[in-house]
Amino acid sequence: MGKHLVSIVMGSDSDLEIMREAGKALEDFGIAYEMDVTSAHRSPDRTADFARKAAGRGIRVIIAGAGGAAHLAGVIAAHTILPVIGVPIPSTCLQGMDSLLATVQMPAGIPVATVAIGKPGATNAGILAAQIIGLADSGVAKKLKAHKEKLAEGVVEKSKKLQKSLRG
């Protein structure tokens, strides 16, 4: 894998189980990534510094996951021109709806691409980051095409299995 192109950050180490799914998706496409913890609220200066320096370190996409008052992705987006993908983490009694709204409801001018709550969202964040990188990397684009073909083949196989069981 080589130089890190994606940075995966989370508000707490308790988010690791979910955010690890973004890393797995990136690994499937052969994309090197780094992973760290930073908090929009508990370490705002560290978070702003991370965001401002990411592009200079070669990072091309940032994936940020946070729960509760999930402002991490938005704070990062405010300090960088890199694309930021937000993963809402289901960490409170609101089952992640608070995280979803805090991540997706950004003011005009500070976009955060927001994916689904939890593990499916983290997986999709990794795939979306690969799609962004694939715009300039034909090797990654080829792997993305194969991924889509595999998904389609899976549907055909499930259809065949269902039809066979119905005829049973």
Image (cartoon, rainbow, N blue to C red):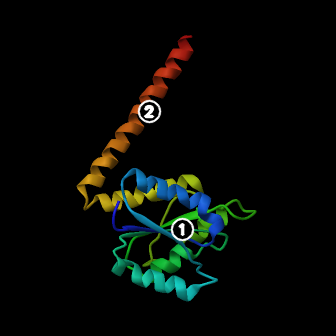
* Residue lying at 32% horizontally and 62% vertically, measured from the top left: 133
Q: Position of residue 167 (x, y in %)?
A: 54, 11
Query: Mark 2 or mark 1, which has the lower sequence index?
Result: 1
Q: The C terminus is located in which quarter?
A: top right
Label 2 SS: helix
Three-letter amino acid code at the position of disc 1: Val
Q: The N terminus is located in which quarter?
A: bottom left
Q: Decide if residue 16 is in sight here.
A: yes
Q: Nearer the viewer, residue 100 or 138?
A: 138
Give the mark count. Answer: 2
Label 1 SS: helix
State the residue position of label 2: 154
* Residue lying at 59% horizontally and 78% vertically, measured from the top left: 39
State the residue position of label 1: 104
Three-letter amino acid code at the position of disc 2: Gly
In the rendered image, the residue lying farthest to the front is 2
In the rendered image, the residue lying farthest to the top is 168
Q: Position of residue 140 (x, y in %)?
A: 30, 54
Q: Position of residue 45 (x, y in %)?
A: 54, 89
* Residue lying at 60% horizontally and 63% vertically, measured from the top left: 16
Left or right: 157, with 102 as reference point: left
Q: Is residue 74 above or below residue 154?
A: below
Task: Tell me the crowding category of disc 1: few under 14, some 14 to 19, or many 20 or more residues within 10 angstroms, Cα based.
Answer: many
Give the distance between the C-alpha atoms of the residues marked 2 and 1, in whole angstroms. Answer: 31 Å
Q: Decide if residue 106 is in sight here.
A: no
In the rendered image, the residue lying farthest to the bottom is 45
